Amino acid sequence: MANEETKEVKEEVAKTEETPKKKSFISEAKLEMLIAIFLGLTAVLTAWATWIGSLHGGNQATNYTKSNNVASDANSMYNEAFQSLVQDMMTWNMITDFKFDMALAELRGDATEVELIDTKVQQIIDDNCTEEFQEAINWAFEQEEEVSPFMKDGYIESYYAEADAMYKESQALLEEGMQDNKNGDTYNLVTVIYSLVLFLLGIIGIFKNIPNRFAVFVIAVILLILAVIFMVRIPMPTGFSLGSFF
């Protein structure tokens, strides 16, 4: 009886030895090589994303500074425009007073005084009025009713045209800086994903089973591909050129 049991055990052992072991679909050497390649690739991509993110940060700071400077200049120009408007209003009041005196002289039939006042008015216009203001004054004189040159459509707005343009430029720079800030933050998120990929590739070695190690490797590669797709969709910094750094 014991001999028969011993014989059966030997037969089972022989069958086991004869049965070939299933080969893994990827060898350990190939997996190690792939891990090394993707570790290097991910490290390069991480460095790239970090650099581009820092460039966005630099553009953000530059655009914010430019926006503040342009807004400050616009405020100065706005104040200058307001002072010019007040000065032109005072000049117009002076012209109006002379025109009233000239009308009284005409009623009295004093041609000499009329001519003298008209000369004064013309001298005031020549000495104190810009070309645009003179055009507005001529427009006012041409009207049938007595009107002010400041009633001409768009004339008062013309005083602030340059200041308004600079305000718009300041706002555009501010919005560009905000976009740079957003892009920089997005690149930071990409670097976080790359760090996760590096982490997964780094811990593969703790798994003894090849299929388990390969499964972690596949997850890391998928994350890497998604991160690269996400990164290439982010705009590059304004004016970026690799050639400018060499």
Image (cartoon, rainbow, N blue to C red):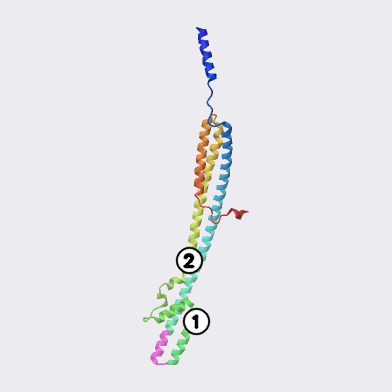
Residue 168: image x %, image y %? 47, 63
Residue 212 vs residue 64, the one in the foreground: 212
Q: Is residue 78 visible?
A: no
Callout 2 secondary element: helix
Residue 6 vs residue 198, the one in the foreground: 6
**Neighbours of disc 2 within 10 Å: few (<14), some (14-19), many (20+):** few
Residue that protrudes farthest toward the right in the picture: 246
Residue 154: image x %, image y %? 42, 72
Q: Does the magenta stretch mainly form a helix, a strand or a loop? A: helix
Q: Amino acid at mark 1?
A: Asp
Which quadrant does the C terminus fall into? bottom right
Q: Is residue 179 above or below residue 4?
A: below
Q: Quadrant of residue 198?
A: top right
| Magenta segment boundaries in residue numbering | 99-110
Q: Is residue 198 visible?
A: yes
Q: So how many labels did they put on this image?
A: 2
Q: Please say whether residue 169 is one of the residues in the magenta stretch.
A: no
Q: Which residue is mark 2?
A: 165
Residue that protrudes farthest toward the left in the picture: 145
Q: Which residue is mark 1?
A: 126
First in sequence, mark 2 or 1: give its number: 1
Q: Residue at x 54, y 38 (%)?
A: 199
